[in-house]
Image (cartoon, helix red, strand yellow):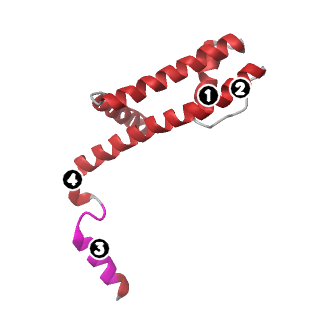
Amino acid sequence: MIAFLTVLARLFQIIYRSWRDPEFRGLFFLVILLLLGGTIFYSRVEGWTLLDSLYFSVITLTTIGYGDLYPTTAASKVFTILYIFIGLGIILAFLNAVGQRALERHRTEDGPEDTIGSNPEDAAKTGSRERE
């Protein structure tokens, strides 16, 4: 449980520190708008609760798809197809931005000497020992 909370705290730190980047903020707001739009659409068209609609939007865009909720009307099915094609790209771009920031943070905390392949002697040591 403590490890989970530590990871969650680091995630929030990464998002907080990345907030200065306008591209990151744009992706963040696109994700919020995407989830909000899906939530409103499914709650109105399918008649689901806001929580169920948000849940379905998140599960769909993260490609988990448990199958406990699914679109039943033709309009919902067409919307879901478009929602996945558009939304998946936005979600992946946002997750990529978060991952890049996490990697940058990890590299600056550890320093360049701790990253694999940053020291030319590492390659020489590994290569020469494996060949001998």
Left or right of residue 13, residue 119 in this image? left
- State the residue at coordinates (67%, 27%): 80
Residue 10 in picture, x, y percent from top left: 34, 36
- State the residue at coordinates (33%, 46%): 103
Q: How many residues crowd mark 4 within 10 Å: few (<14), some (14–19), many (20+)?
A: few
Amino acid under label 3? Ala
- Asked if one can make out residue 49 in the rendered structure from this viewpoint, the answer is yes
Q: Do residues under tags 1 and 4 come within 8 Å of each other at their CB atoms?
A: no
State the separation of the CA atoms marked 1 and 4.
41 Å
Left or right of residue 16, residue 40 in this image? right
Residue 45 in picture, x, y percent from top left: 70, 13
Most frequent secondary structure within the magenta stretch: helix
State the separation of the CA atoms marked 4 and 3.
18 Å
Amino acid under label 1? Tyr
Q: Do residues under tags 1 and 3 come within 8 Å of each other at their CB atoms?
A: no
Q: Do residues under tags 2 and 4 come within 8 Å of each other at their CB atoms?
A: no
- State the residue at coordinates (22%, 73%): 121
Residue 53 in picture, x, y percent from top left: 63, 18
Residue 96 in picture, x, y percent from top left: 43, 41
Secondary structure category for the residue under label 4: loop
State the separation of the CA atoms marked 1 and 3.
46 Å
Left or right of residue 95, residue 122 in this image? left
Secondary structure category for the residue under label 3: helix
Label for residue 111? Answer: 4
Amino acid under label 2? Val
- Mark closer to the chain start, 1 or 4: 1
Residue to which mark 3 is pinned:
123
